[in-house]
Amino acid sequence: MYNLFEDEDDIFQGSPKSKFLDIVFNANRDLVHNELERLMTRMAAMELLLQEAHGEEGIDRVIQNVQFERADEIDMMAKNLYIISVGNVLTQNE
């Protein structure tokens, strides 16, 4: 459906996830560290918001329901987040 990101003829060749992993394993360690810390801080904030709204025990249930009901949207969002993270690391590398 969203093959825009997976065009093997593209000069970047590969999916956003594969490019993200290439960057994580090959870019400047400090830049990758900063980006991973940014992602963990955002995830922690989201976990706290979910915990406040649904309780400690409800977090996993809510996440599973959303993953099931909105799989395509989650896939697209994950691809966008990979692209954003790659951009963050590469722009700091200049």
Image (cartoon, grey):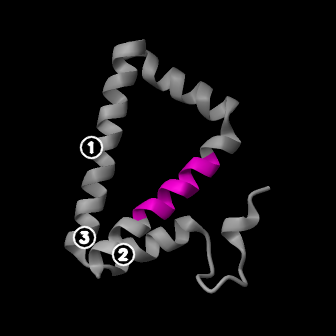
Q: Which mark is residue 53?
A: none
Q: Residue at x 28, y 79 (%)?
A: 93
Quick check: is 41 in the magenta stretch? no
In percent of width and height, residue 94 lies at 29, 82
Amino acid on which the number 3 mark rests in the picture: Leu
Residue 36 left/right relative to 72: left
Quick check: is 80 in the magenta stretch? yes
**According to the image, label 2 marks what residue?**
90
Q: Which residues are magenta?
A: 75-85
Amino acid on which the number 1 mark rests in the picture: Thr
**According to the image, label 1 marks what residue?**
41
Lower position in the chain sequence, tag 1 or tag 3 = 3
Q: How many marks?
A: 3
Q: Determine whether the residue tagged by mark 3 lies in a helix, strand or loop.
A: helix
Quadrant for residue 22, please give it.
bottom left
**Dot 2 alpha-carbon crowd within 10 angstroms: few under 14, some 14 to 19, many 20 or more:** some
Give the number of the mark in front: 2 or 3.
2
Give the number of the mark in front: 2 or 1.
2
In percent of width and height, residue 32 lies at 28, 68
**According to the image, label 3 marks what residue?**
31
Amino acid on which the number 2 mark rests in the picture: Leu
Q: Residue at x 37, y 71 (%)?
A: 24
Tell me if label 1 and label 3 are in contact, CB under 8 Å. Answer: no
Q: Residue furthest right?
A: 1
Lower position in the chain sequence, tag 2 or tag 3 = 3
Q: Residue at x 67, y 34 (%)?
A: 70
Q: Determine whether the residue tagged by mark 2 lies in a helix, strand or loop.
A: helix
In percent of width and height, residue 63 lies at 52, 29
Mark 2–mark 3 Cα distance, whole angstroms, equals: 9 Å
Mark 1–mark 3 Cα distance, whole angstroms, equals: 15 Å
Q: Determine whether the residue tagged by mark 1 lies in a helix, strand or loop.
A: helix
